[in-house]
C-alpha cells in the first residue's frame, strides 16, 4: 500500500501561509532544492484542495525551468465541490466521497502520494486516519497570523518523531507519523 505524505513549509507559529496566502517567507536554497527534488521523485501523485490547485495550475503549465516538466506530467487529484473542471494536464477532479476515493488510491500498488498546501484537505484526511507522514520544514519566522496547518482540531493527535534534519538556512525538517503512541 502506498503512503500519503503531507509535505509543508511552516512557520514557528504553525502557519503554512500568510493571511492572504503569502509564502514569501519560504527559504528555498540549494540544500532545500535537493530535498524537494528527492521528495518529488519519490511520489507519483499529488493531491490538492481547490485553492492550492488553482495557484499551482496558474503557474506550472507556463513554467520552463527546473521541475516544470515533472509538475505538469505527474498525476494530480484536486478535491473540490465547487470547481467545475480541472484542466491542468493529468489532473482528475474529485467532488464527492473524498475519503473513499483517497482510500482506494492508497490501496494501489504505486509510489507514494503527497499533499502540498491544502490544509483543509490534509485535515479531513488526517481525521479519517489516511495521512501516513508529515514532512514539515519549519522556517525561522513568526508571522503572528496566517493560515494554520492544522484546522478544526477537536482532540489531541499524538505524533511520533521519525527523523530531524537541520538545514544551513536555519530551517529544521521534522518528519512525523500521526497517531503513533509515544
Image: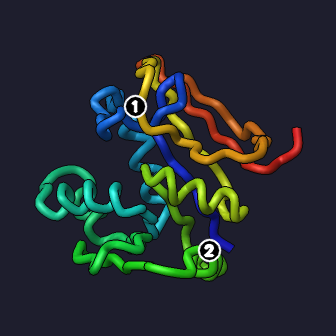
Q: Position of residue 39 (x, y in %)?
A: 48, 51
Which marked residue is nearer to the observer: mark 2 or mark 1? Answer: 2
- Residue 164 versus residue 138: which sits nearer the camera? 138
Local secondary structure at mark 1: helix
Local crowd size for mark 1, using a 10 Å CA cut-off: few (<14), some (14–19), many (≥20)? few
Q: Position of residue 65 (x, y in %)?
A: 16, 51
Residue pictured at 66% horizontal, 79% vertical: 107
Local secondary structure at mark 2: helix
Residue 21 in sight? yes
Depicted 82 relative to depicted 174: above or below? below
Residue 108 in sight? no
Q: Position of residue 49 (x, y in %)?
A: 41, 62
Local crowd size for mark 2, using a 10 Å CA cut-off: few (<14), some (14–19), many (≥20)? some
Q: Quadrant of residue 67?
A: bottom left
Residue sitting at the far right: 181
Q: Position of residue 18 (x, y in %)?
A: 36, 32
Identify the residue position indicated by label 2 in the image: 99
Identify the residue position indicated by label 1 in the image: 31
State the quadrant of the N terminus.
bottom right
Q: Is residue 178 left or right of residue 114?
A: right
State the quadrant of the C terminus.
top right
Q: Is residue 67 left or right of residue 19?
A: left
Depicted 16 relative to depicted 118: above or below? above
Q: Quadrant of residue 101?
A: bottom right
Residue pictured at 41% horizontal, 32% vertical: 146
Q: CA distance from mark 2 to mark 1?
A: 35 Å
Q: Is residue 79 left or right of residue 160?
A: left
Depicted 98 relative to depicted 28: above or below? below
Depicted 3 relative to depicted 65: above or below? below
The label number, if any, that marks residue 137 in the structure image: none
Q: Earlier in the sequence, mark 2 or mark 1?
A: 1
Q: Are marks 2 and 1 in contact (CB under 8 Å)?
A: no
Amino acid at each position: 500500500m502506498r503512503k500519503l505524505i503531507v509535505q509543508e513549509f511552516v512557520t514557528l507559529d504553525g502557519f503554512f501561509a500568510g493571511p492572504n496566502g503569502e509564502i514569501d517567507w519560504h527559504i528555498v536554497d540549494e540544500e532545500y532544492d535537493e530535498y524537494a527534488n528527492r521528495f518529488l521523485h519519490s511520489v507519483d501523485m499529488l493531491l490538492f484542495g481547490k485553492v492550492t490547485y488553482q495557484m499551482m495550475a496558474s503557474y506550472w503549465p507556463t513554467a520552463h525551468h527546473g521541475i516544470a516538466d515533472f509538475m505538469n506530467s505527474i498525476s494530480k487529484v484536486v478535491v473540490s465541490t465547487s470547481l467545475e473542471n480541472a484542466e491542468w494536464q493529468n489532473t482528475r477532479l474529485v467532488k464527492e466521497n473524498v475519503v473513499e476515493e483517497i482510500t482506494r488510491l492508497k490501496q494501489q500498488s504505486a509510489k507514494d502520494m503527497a499533499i502540498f498546501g491544502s490544509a483543509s484537505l490534509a485535515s479531513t484526511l488526517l481525521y479519517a486516519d489516511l495521512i501516513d507522514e508529515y514532512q514539515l520544514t519549519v522556517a525561522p519566522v513568526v508571522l503572528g497570523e496566517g493560515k494554520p496547518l492544522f484546522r478544526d482540531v477537536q482532540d489531541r493527535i499524538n505524533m511520533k518523531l521519525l527523523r530531524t534534519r537541520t538545514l544551513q538556512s536555519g530551517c529544521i525538517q521534522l518528519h512525523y507519523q500521526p497517531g503513533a503512541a509515544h
